[in-house]
Amino acid sequence: MSGLREGVGAPRGRLLAYDRANAEEGHIVMRWLALGALVGGLGLVAMGCSEGTRYPNGLADDAYDLEAMALRPEDLPPGFEQRSPGEFTNEAWAAVFQTDDVEAKLRQLEAQGRQRNYVTLFGPRGLGPVLAVTAISTLYGDAGAAERSLREFGCGLPIEASARLEPLLVPAIGDGASGFLERQFDDAGAPTFVDATVCFRTGRVVHAIQATSVAGVEDVAFLVRLAEKQKARVDAVFAGEGG
């Protein structure tokens, strides 16, 4: 899963992955993945218990500055650059999914309480073990809907219904945290890339940070560090210091 195509500002598109043949030639090709329905009942995901921090749930929708909560280039290691498509409404996000019935997908997103999200992409300037980092912050109608997304709906990410997700144990972050791996294979069944995801909730907002890496070198600790950095930005926004 991971990332968004360059062409910032375009609300339609697909989450990005990397074409293996081109990557083997030394060229990383970013493209949007057309991913299917959200995974319902995601019992696989290992949950990090709440660390006791509480975030406001009763603010008006437009009071949640998702852009100010997002990761920034200085949060990433040297050598990464930002490619961000910005904010997605429910209508635009429904179009990301691989479906012949976008209207049905839109109704599903609305039924889950999803309001909007903000997506930030980072890619390395050269080849390396981490091919992309994608951070998505999604606002829900209430804290209960956000919690269900964290536990049951893959943190609001477009995930194929047939995807096999491996649970990750993650530390307590915000009001709760979860994590999972999704492995990619070539036609011969050999592992190629891995999408590792760490999610955490702050009130009505679910934050998902995903790294696409070469199989065998996925680094969950790296994602946890990024999650902690994003949580610090979220805390600053709620304290009136963000922006």
Image (spheres, rainbow, N blue to C red):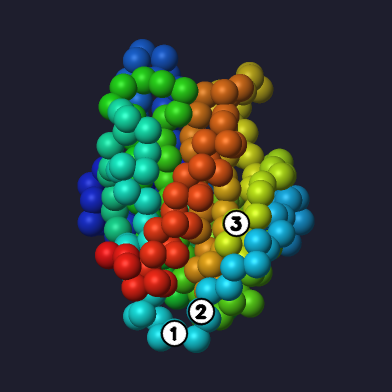
Specify the quadrant that holds the C terminus: bottom left
Q: Which residue is mark 2?
A: 56
Does residue 145 appear left or right of residue 213 in this picture?
right
Residue for point 63% across, 40% down: 181
Q: Amino acid at mark 2?
A: Pro
**How far across and down, in percent of the image, does residue 108 sit?**
56, 72
198 or 76, which is in the foreground? 76
11 or 207, which is in the foreground? 207
Q: Do the residues bearing badges 2 and 1 touch, measured as CB atoms within 8 Å?
A: yes
Residue for point 42% across, 30% down: 131
| The furthest residue to the right | 43
| The furthest residue to the top | 25
Residue for point 65% across, 67% down: 52
* Residue 90: assigned label: none
Asked which quadrant contains residue 240, the reply is bottom left
Residue for point 29% across, 53% down: 85
Q: Nearer the viewer, mark 3 or mark 1?
A: 3
Does residue 157 appear left or right of residue 22 in this picture?
right
Q: Which residue is mark 3?
A: 173
The Cα–Cα distance between marks 3 and 1, rounded to whole angstroms, is 21 Å
Name the element at disc 1. loop
One can see residue 199 in this view: yes
Asked which quadrant contains residue 12, the reply is bottom left
Q: Amino acid at mark 3?
A: Ile
